[in-house]
Image (tube, rainbow, N blue to C red):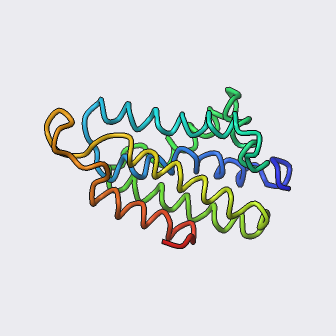
């Protein structure tokens, strides 16, 4: 099973960034108010906590989550994403995040094919969780839809970048 030592520091950084990028792509697809942003951020964090607590989690997922538990891991991910996303508009942020996820597919295929499916499906679950975290449209949560068309399209793009079936 793959762990941090399987990858170069740049590859590991990309894997760390992908966890945040999976949620950010969906958030950027349909930006809305602070309450929605908070709900979506919480959904990403909840997926990390769930993976940490799940004794059956894939070892690579566990290694990534454990690294996120350190200030060094969080800083690596945050700084890498900041470098790539600063000054970009929402649509550009979404595109950049999806490109990161495409890189992950290549890294995992080359270095950790046995862990690739589990890791990529986990990233898709994070994206799905973020998409479902906040009702889109409507007024005060009434009359909205659980997942907007823009978010559905982004989820399809994420699956495509990760080379996962629709």
Q: Position of residue 115 (x, y in %)?
A: 75, 60
Residue 90 left/right relative to 155: left
Q: Nearer the viewer, residue 10 or 64?
A: 64
Q: At 52% across and 68% down in the image, what residue appears?
A: 161
Q: At 25% across and 34% down in the image, what residue appears?
A: 33
Q: At 60% across and 40% down in the image, what residue appears?
A: 77
Q: Position of residue 63 (x, y in %)?
A: 76, 42
Q: Nearer the viewer, residue 32 or 95?
A: 32
Residue 126 left/right relative to 153: right
Q: Is residue 112 above or below residue 7?
A: below
Quarter assignment of residue 151: bottom left
Q: Position of residue 16 (x, y in %)?
A: 64, 45
Q: At 74% across and 42% down in the image, what residue appears?
A: 62
Q: Is residue 59 above or below residue 159?
A: above
Q: How many marks?
A: 0
Q: Nearer the viewer, residue 120 or 12?
A: 120
Image quarter hosting the N terminus: bottom right
Q: Position of residue 93 (x, y in %)?
A: 40, 52
Residue at the outermost top position: 71
Q: Nearer the viewer, residue 139 or 83?
A: 139
């Amino acid at each position: 099973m793959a762990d941090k030592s399987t990858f170069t520091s740049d590859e590991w950084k990309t894997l760390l960034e992908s966890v945040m990028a999976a949620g950010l792509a969906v958030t950027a697809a349909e930006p809305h108010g602070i309450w929605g942003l908070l709900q979506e951020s919480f959904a990403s964090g909840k997926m990390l906590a769930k993976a940490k607590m799940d004794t059956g989690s894939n070892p690579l997922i566990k290694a990534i989550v454990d690294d996120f538990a350190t200030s060094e891991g969080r800083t690596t991910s945050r700084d890498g994403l900041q470098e790539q996303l600063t000054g970009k508009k929402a649509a550009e942020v979404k595109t950049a995040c999806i490109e990161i996820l495409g890189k992950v597919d290549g890294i995992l295929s080359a270095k950790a094919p046995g862990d690739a499916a589990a890791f990529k499906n986990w990233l898709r679950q994070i994206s799905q969780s973020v998409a479902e975290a906040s009702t889109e449209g409507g007024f005060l949560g009434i009359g909205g839809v659980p997942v907007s068309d823009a978010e559905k399209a982004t989820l399809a793009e994420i699956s495509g970048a990760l080379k996962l079936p629709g």
